[in-house]
Image: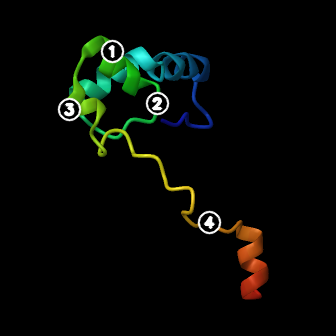
Amino acid sequence: MVIPRQSQNALSALAWMNFYYTPKIAGIVEDWVSYVCPVPAAQDYILDVIKDKTVANSPLVFRPPRPTNFPRLLHLSRLQRLSGVE
């Protein structure tokens, strides 16, 4: 979610985002839509309260942990230095 820079109700938008991204609400929404969830704690809510193991264990809804040996992205300034682009 984003809030446009010249929004007339930015505080209301922030309040909505704070509500929407709580584990309970995000869990209810994700259990219904089965879409990528930005709230990792919602997985516990779906497992423990809603009791929907199919959604809670779906790698499409909750990404599995990344291996620790997974290469990290280089910082943009380091990439620019390495490539000679300023």
Q: CA distance from mark 3 to mark 4?
A: 32 Å
Badge 2 local density, few (<14 within 10 Å), some, or many (20+)?
A: some
For label 1, the residue is: 48
Q: Callout 4, which amino acid?
A: Leu
Dot 1 amino acid type: Asp
Mark 4 lies on a secondary structure that is loop
Say which mark, if any, is on residue 67: none
Q: Which mark is residue 39?
A: 2
Disc 3 residue type?
Answer: Thr
* Picture coordinates of residue 50, whole percent (x, y): 26, 14
Q: Which mark is residue 54?
A: 3
> Mark 2 belongs to which amino acid?
Val
The residue pinned by badge 4 equals 73
Q: Earlier in the sequence, mark 2 or mark 3?
A: 2
The residue depicted at 55 percent of the width and 16 percent of the height is: 15
48 relative to 21 in the view: left or right: left
Whether residues under marks 1 and 2 lie with C-beta atoms below 8 angstroms apart, the answer is: no
Q: What crowding class fits label 3: few (fewer than 14 Cα within 10 Å), some (14-19), or many (20 or more)?
A: few
Sequence-first disc among 4 and 1: 1
